[in-house]
Image (cartoon, rainbow, N blue to C red):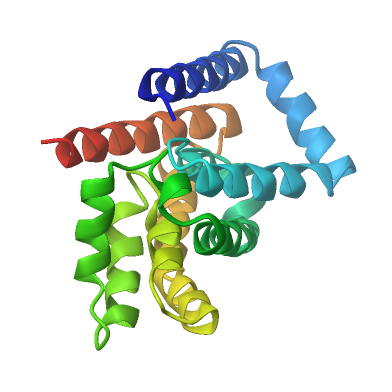
Amino acid sequence: MNKKYIFAIVSILFFFFGLSIILLVINPSYTDNIVRFTREHKFYGPLFLVLWRILGIVVPAIPAGVVSFAVVPLFGWQLTYVYTLIGILIGTSTSFWLARKFREPLVAKFLPLQKIHKLEDSLSHKKRFAAIVALRLFTVPVMDFSSYIAGLTKISFAKFFLATIIASIPDIGIFYFGEELYKRVFGKSIAIAVAMLFFLALGYFLFRRRSSLK
């Protein structure tokens, strides 16, 4: 996949998200409408979050975790974690089986072949399970390609699925931290909290992405 094309898509998505968040801060009535909508239509908010998380895994260039962190004030950290985990499990399973079926020609659209082979070699037979857990822990905040790499190995889907669940456990602390910021720092203002959490997560993502490219 053309990197410029991916960058353009991600930039457009973040532009609209950023613009929406700025509007929330400028006009609190928008926030009230969104909160009212999510409470009256309890299915749509979680559905969006789950689908967005799936998209961010199947298309690794999309940092869907940034949005997951930002919506903690809307759902609370517990439900945000549950919805995010559902999206992660569906998304990683999809990526895993896509890689297992279509192999390197598909994965090469997201990563250079040289890097793919290097990561495959790092997943040794004896330590493959632990390596996948570590790979998800340290690469997901930048670009979630671990599911595709795992699909190229001989690891069983059951072990991969379990490794994904284990690697997702630290998200509990992250979302809890986000809710505490919302309650203690942002004065329980949903608009300000969502905006600050979004840009905080975005800053972390950009920092990690830049570090990974060095």
Q: Quadrant of the N terminus?
A: top left
Name the residue rendered at 61%, 58% in the picture: 94
Q: Position of residue 70 (x, y in %)?
A: 51, 39
Q: Quadrant of the C terminus?
A: top left
Q: Position of residue 30 (x, y in %)?
A: 72, 19
Task: Give the camera-side residue of 176 and 52.
Answer: 52
The answer to whether residue 142 is left or right of residue 105 is: left
Q: Is 92 located above or below residue 16 in the figure?
A: below
The answer to whether residue 127 is left or right of residue 192 is: left
Task: Give the camera-side residue of 25 and 83.
Answer: 83
Q: Is 198 located above or below residue 161 in the figure?
A: above
Q: Position of residue 206 (x, y in %)?
A: 28, 31
Residue at the bottom extreme of this rendering = 126
Task: Give the camera-side residue of 38 and 122.
Answer: 122
Q: Tell me if I can see residue 81 in this picture.
A: no
The answer to whether residue 5 is left or right of residue 206 is: right
Q: Is 166 located above or below residue 16 in the figure?
A: below
